[in-house]
Amino acid sequence: MKPVSALLKNDAPTVWSVKPDDSVFAALQVLAEHDVGALTVVENGKLVGILSERDYTRKVTLLGRSSKDTKVADIMTRNVMVVTPQSRTSDCMALMRLKRIRHLPVIDGSTVVGMISIRDLLDDAIADHELTIAQLQSYIYS
């Protein structure tokens, strides 16, 4: 499989982020506006966490909290698994499976340069398989 940088080139990555002091409600608006499932949480240019739809459902909704009164810092995942642009997509899949996560921030040095989701990896794997099948069919029928 290819490096993560190849996936980022295809999608012209935009990393949506919020601050720890933002309300969860404001973060939900960003999630909805950009149709994404997770946001990086950045403070002073540094990645300090990730906020996912799963964090919201388990740490706000199920606990009866108010999204307008709860800060992102109160529910974000702090120990963030990250990858680099040089990471192999197969390693990312293995990490996601092992840690049971759906999103990985991509960092270059200390800068967040992208975010990949399990959907990105699956779409890429399917495209690779389809290309292989087409090449084999072309070889067989030529």
Image (tube, rainbow, N blue to C red):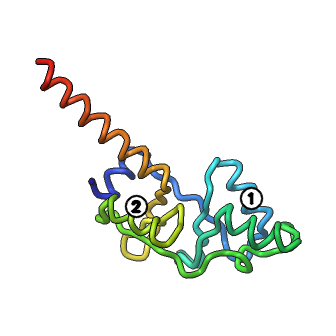
Q: Nearer the viewer, residue 52 or 130?
A: 130
Badge nearest the viewer, 1 or 2: 2
Side of 17 relative to 60 (left or right): left
Are circles 1 and 2 on residues that touch, CB within 8 Å?
Answer: no
Extreme-top residue of the structure: 142
Tell me which label, 1 or 2, sits earlier in the chain.
Answer: 1
Residue 10 location (% of width, % of height): 38, 44
Question: What is the secondary structure assignment of the residue under circle 1?
Answer: helix
* Residue linked to disc 2: 93
* Residue linked to disc 1: 28
Q: Nearer the viewer, residue 35 or 55?
A: 55
Residue occupying the point 76% across, 73% down: 59
Q: Is residue 2 above or below residue 85?
A: above
Extreme-front residue of the structure: 140
Side of 12 relative to 137 (left or right): right
Residue 77 location (% of width, % of height): 62, 76
Q: Is residue 68 above or below residue 131?
A: below
Instruction: Rate crowding at label 2 as few (under 14), some (14 to 19) or many (20 or more) other CA atoms within 10 Å.
Output: some
Residue occupying the point 53% across, 75% down: 47
Q: Identify the image quadrant of residue 108.
A: bottom left
Cα separation, mark 1 vs mark 2, equals 26 Å
Label 2 amino acid? Met
Question: What is the secondary structure assignment of the residue under circle 2?
Answer: helix
Label 1 amino acid? Leu
Q: Nearer the viewer, residue 134 or 72?
A: 134
Residue occupying the point 62% across, 56% down: 37
Q: Is residue 68 above or below residue 89?
A: below
Residue 103 location (% of width, % of height): 52, 62
Side of 74 relative to 113 (left or right): right
Image quarter where the C terminus lies is top left
Residue 20 location (% of width, % of height): 68, 76
